[in-house]
Amino acid sequence: MATAAQFVPVDVYLRSSFEPDAEYVDGEIQERAVGELDHAAWQAAIQKWFWKHEQEWGIRVLAELRVQVSPTRFRVPDVVVLENTGPLREMEQIVKTAPVAVFEILSPEDKLVRVLEKLADYEAMGVRGIFVVNPKSGEKYQYLGGDLKHVEQVALMVGQTGRMFRMSEIEGLVG
């Protein structure tokens, strides 16, 4: 028999640390699936690829950063791409402005219904690029309008500029 989740106030979540970090959804703390080697390799490859373009594109790339998608929901994407708004110390400690892109890398424990709910949260926040990678199959998806679409070449809007990248370029960096 399932036990009911205990309501946790948002300020308690924000003052707490979890290993790995957990998400907060409407008063419930939700553990994140822990990645395996292929998950970590994809995460590193995505970061490495975008780091090469930080200066040129005016972005910052970070892993596992809390993103407040609504007043009662905090998500922790595997990789987040933010517009570079100045010195790091002046940027939001918990992201409240829609990122340029988020990447979710699937783990064996991930449940489709929870992943789709998380992707819908990003879209409702206004995230422009929402991507999912299945490291086991190598399939790459973009989430648009409630649908997951296979994707290889992607366009992102950074500021007023469109930027293109190929998922295969990132995949080439996976150990």
Image (cartoon, rainbow, N blue to C red):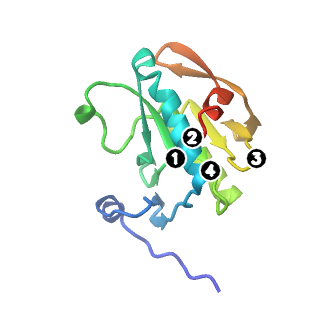
For label 3, the residue is: 137
Residue on which the image places disc 2: 103
Of 123 and 34, nearer the camera is: 34
Q: Amino acid at mark 4?
A: Asp
Labels 1 and 4 touching (C-beta < 8 A): no
Please provide percent x and percent y for residue 17.
34, 62
Give the Cα separation between the discs numbered 1 and 4: 13 Å
Foreground mark, 3 or 2?
A: 3
Report whether residue 124 is seen: no
Distance of mark 1 from mark 2, alpha carbons? 6 Å
The amino acid on which the numbered mark 1 sits, given as a three-letter code, is Asp
Q: Which residue is mark 1?
A: 78
Q: What residue is rendered at 47% in x and 21% in y? A: 53
Front: mark 1 or 4: 4
- Name the residue beneath numbered marker 4: 38
Tell me whether the residue at label 3 lies in contact with that at label 1, contact meaning CB atoms closer than 8 angstroms. no
The reply to whether residue 148 is in sight is yes
Viewer-nearest residue: 112 or 97: 112
Looking at the image, is mark 3 or mark 2 earlier in the sequence? 2
The residue shown at (65%, 42%) is 132
| Cα distance in 3D space between marks 3 and 1 | 18 Å
